[in-house]
Image (cartoon, rainbow, N blue to C red):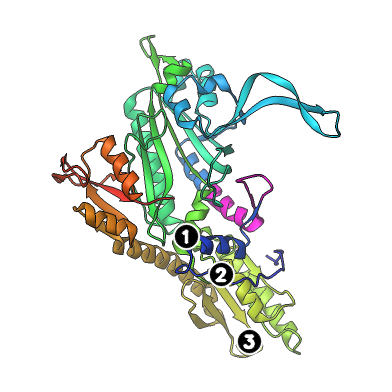
Amino acid sequence: MQNNLNEKTTEKKITSRSEDYSQWYLDVIEAADLADSSPVRGCMIIKPYGYAIWEKIHDILDKKFKQQGVQNAYFPLFIPQSFLTKEAKHVEGFAKEVAIVTHHRLESDGHGGLKPAGELAEPLIIRPTSETIIYDTFSRWIHSYRDLPLLINQWANVVRWEMRTRPFLRTTEFLWQEGHTAHKNKEEAEEMTLKMIKEYQDFSETYMALPVIPGYKTESEKFAGADYTTCIEAMMQDGKSLQAGTSHLLGQNFAKAFEVSFLNEKGEKEYVWQTSWGVSTRLIGALIMAHSDDKGLVLPPNLAPIPVVIIPIGQGKPDYEQVLSFAKNLSVKISKETNLTINLDDRDLRPGEKFFYWEKRGVPIRIEIGPKDLQNNSVVFARRDTGEKATVLIQDVILKTRETLNDIQKSLYLKAESFRNDNTHFIDNLADFKKMVDGKGGFINSHWCGSSECEAKIKETTGATIRCVPFNQKEEVGKCILCGGKSNGRVMFAKSY
């Protein structure tokens, strides 16, 4: 693939993580050319390279969903306001985040400007999530037990009026997928709920090289209107937790509100049992914060839009055309035999500028070819994750490409896992708990009595929240970190995004 990216090189220095982690994150996004600011408050423009990462995420997950029998559909962006009020907990959970359309068309205000003209009979909500409009539709699609299970997914955008925004992590408008399923009984719905959170865990660990902790959200942290919520939590390099995906058992709450019912084998009316599950473009934020360094973006090969870049060296020298011809042939050969996207960077720039350019964009392997390399029947491999360089014979390039990409993928996972393990703590004393939250941070496993009052008080006084009750939680009688009341097991606390 010939280089068709913006040739502008960014000279701005990336702030170090130790100096200012938040600014480092923004600098990496800019240096890697992932996103741009928008004239609309809290929104971002996803640039081609950033969107290419989302396309990789989309394509992999879409295939996984379809293997589960899920079909894609699309539902309207606008939701009648009355729909949102049908499920009481749901409207309470989203009321402060919705954007509302109250008028259609504009007319002159008589002073050279424009003003809203036609007022809508019923205000329309710009979807913050689609349960209500999808389940109104399900009520017309489902009649008999033979129509179940109904497994639907939607790739779409949503709008949530956030007060504090940050690119990819929390924006007013973002991209996501939202799965919605209907089942004939609770057992099937629960199986689907847990199956999808397992799919997200597998995706995170296999493709993102990001270890996660799966578990249940507490009652106060669960999705508004759900019976319970499952999640995967990942640790970022600053010790904070990031919720990377959720899967919810909705029970029959929305089914009863929207009359999503069916006739069972006996001809009796029953309400369906439902699930919903989703991930969003915040996964790109997770990739940045989990793996990148002070030089720029670091991408795991399984999600890199360009896993390998080839850079011919020696422009302006007599034998450069021979080097370039060889580089082109090598690019085609690697692409054909590995089915990878290979970028040949033959721009009229100094080698150092090209190295810097691709380094900031996190390309896993850089292959350098110069006149001396050609004479020695070899090339130079440079790894983005470690910066190591190695001379590779031409006949070994295909094998070395596969081996190196596999090793980078594995090494990034092990590095992230080691970091998480080193920053996971078991604490039974409130003073030590507060000290850890204010200091190193990380995942803190402590006892909790189960009361929402203690949960809220811990959040208020320390800034840490219960990220999840881990699936593999061991039964362990102890005392609540706050009130000293009885606890049957530890939960995972952390500061979060």
Q: Are marks 1 and 3 in contact (CB under 8 Å)?
A: no
Residue at 75 percent of width and 83 percent of height:
321
Task: Say left or right for 262 vs 327.
Answer: left
- List the residue tagged with mark 2: 14
Task: Say left or right for 260 vs 453.
Answer: right
Q: Dot 1: within a 10 Å radius of its alpha carbon, few (fewer than 14), some, or many (20 or more) residues?
A: many
Label 2 sits on what residue type? Answer: Ile
Q: Nearer the viewer, mark 3 or mark 2?
A: 2
- Closer to the camera in the image, 231 or 137: 231
Label 3 sits on what residue type? Answer: Leu
- List the residue tagged with mark 1: 289
Residue at 82 percent of width and 28 percent of height:
109
Would you say residue 441 is visible in this rendering? no
| Residues shaded magenta | 38-59
- List the residue tagged with mark 3: 374
Decide whether residue 41 is among the magenta residues.
yes
In the image, residue 96 above or below residue 479:
above
Locate residue 222: give its quadrant.
Answer: top left
| Secondary element at image label 1 | helix
Would you say residue 103 is visible in this rendering? yes
Residue at 66 percent of width and 88 percent of height:
371
